[in-house]
Amino acid sequence: MSRLLRDPLVIAVCTVVCAALNACTPAGQVLFSLLPDGTIPIMLSNLERESDTNRRRLAELERKADWMGLVTFAEENIAKEASNASWWLVAGYAYSRQKNHPRAIACFREMIRLEPDSAEGWNLLGQEHRAAGESQRAVAVLTQALTALRDSAVTLMLLGESYSDIGQFDLAVRPYRQALDIDAGLMPAWSGLARALIKRGQLAEAERIARSLEKNNPPLAAAIRTEIGAALKMAQ
């Protein structure tokens, strides 16, 4: 297991990572809070050796939305300890908030080089490519990720989303299904699967998904039915 999963550190910062990446692209409704334990994994865990002063400074910069200051802070620490994957994550996060996708991508790539078994790193890299409008590249990254990781429901879901971004709904269906085989509670995967099925004209199967979600997630069931209705109107 990656070191980035094993330490209780800076949960609030990780939460904002999730929000930032979700907001980057309309197609990017990917909830990293659906990773282990129903919360965002502790991606800054190998900062446990850092002083409380550094931790407070990190939180202060994030709270103020001082992204350039956060970049500077991260890069100062990278200069001291370039092998610390978490500082690359902080830098990538700060660049992502500035919509400087090339720099964010470079940081997340270095994070993966240092922590090749980090599902979070691969997922953040794939999502950043999507945010940059490079969903075809995201497909390649996430496909590679699945050769480096054990089955990851979120990685598979992101792969389905990336295929959907580029209109390859036939290819999107399989990773969505695989994600749900691993984690049937991954609601964005149900949404993506239903959307892909509707695009393929498989409205009856999409309706079955909506029916199965009526009790546990009525808003999602209603949204799927709205899309089914729109597809039926277009077919008339």
Image (cartoon, rainbow, N blue to C red):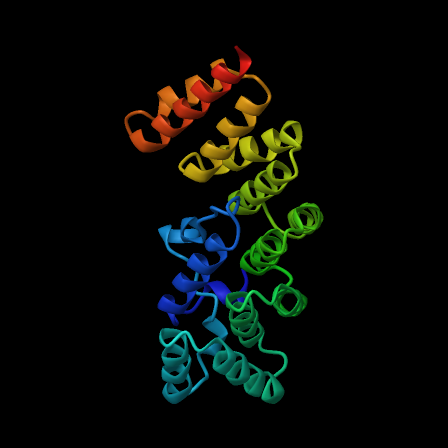
Residue 208 in the image: x percent, y percent? Answer: 42, 17
Residue 100 in the image: x percent, y percent? Answer: 60, 67
Q: Is residue 177 left or right of residue 216?
A: right
**Residue found at the very far left of the displayed protein:** 215
Residue displayed at 60% across by 51% down = 130
Please tell me in which quadrant of the rendered image residue 17 appears.
Answer: bottom left
Q: Is residue 113 left or right of residue 93?
A: right
Work out which quarter of the rendered image holds the N terminus and state it. Answer: bottom right
Please tell me in which quadrant of the rendered image residue 62 appears.
Answer: bottom left
Residue displayed at 49% across by 74% down = 46
Q: Nearer the viewer, residue 147 or 103?
A: 103
Please tell me in which quadrant of the rendered image residue 178 appears.
Answer: top right
Q: Is residue 14 left or right of residue 93?
A: left
Whether residue 186 is visible? no
Q: Nearer the viewer, residue 28 or 115?
A: 28
50 vs 153: above or below: below
Residue 24 in the image: x percent, y percent? Answer: 51, 55
Residue displayed at 53% across by 73% down = 86
Q: Nearer the viewer, residue 41 or 133?
A: 133
